[in-house]
Image: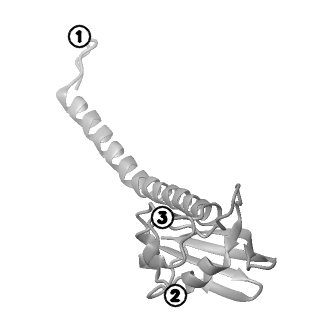
Amino acid sequence: MIDKGEKGTVSYDFIVAIVMFITIYATLMLTVTYPLTDTRVRRDQFEGETFLLTDLVTKNPGYPANWTQMDQVELFGLALHKEGNNPHILDMGKLVELNNTDCITIKEKVPLDSYLYISMDVQGRVYECNVEGQVAPERHEKTSFYVWNGTEYLMGQGRIHVW
């Protein structure tokens, strides 16, 4: 209780109550907002990795650029290796090899920490890496591309998942 003769003084009980209130309020605010922030960070990470993987797969021939079998690959990419820049034109031989490869092998040949799944549809024929279990649709990117089959360009649609 404040005595009328002591203006400007505050009791220790009041100070302790204010400190407890601020502590409880801060704890509640951090507890409530942390999961939302963590979810946004994960979503942003997946979006970035999905964009990077889509770019890598459709614009890059890989290394070595003229690979024909997965055991030759150091950096994965499906773009056609020709003189000049050929973004979004994929190599049919590399797509066929994609069908014979599991997603874990491809994951080891791209600079990502997340799991991935690649599926490319060329005029009704689907080329995809083999994945065990279900593909988690955490984040996916659709892409359009052309495929050079040796005689003509074919239009294709692709979907790349990262989780």
Q: In the orientation shown, which residue stands out farthest toward the left?
A: 12
Residue 16, quarter of the rendered image: top left
Q: Earlier in the sequence, mark 1 or mark 2?
A: 1
In the image, 63: left or right of 14? right
| Residue for badge 2 | 100
Mark sitting on residue 5: 1
Cα separation between marks 1 and 3 = 81 Å
Q: Residue at x 81, y 77 (%)?
A: 152
Depth check: 46 or 40 in front? 46
Q: Earlier in the sequence, mark 1 or mark 3?
A: 1
**Viewer-side label of 1, 2:** 2
Total numbered labels: 3
Question: Where is 107 relative to 135, above or below?
Answer: above
Q: Secondary structure at mark 2?
A: loop
Image coordinates for residue 144, horizontal then vertical, percent: 74, 69
CA neighbours of label 2 inside 10 A, class few (<14), some (14 to 19), many (20+): some
Cα separation between marks 1 and 2 = 89 Å
| Residue for badge 3 | 75
Residue 3, quarter of the rendered image: top left
Looking at the picture, which amino acid does disc 2 mark? Asn
Looking at the picture, which amino acid does disc 1 mark? Gly
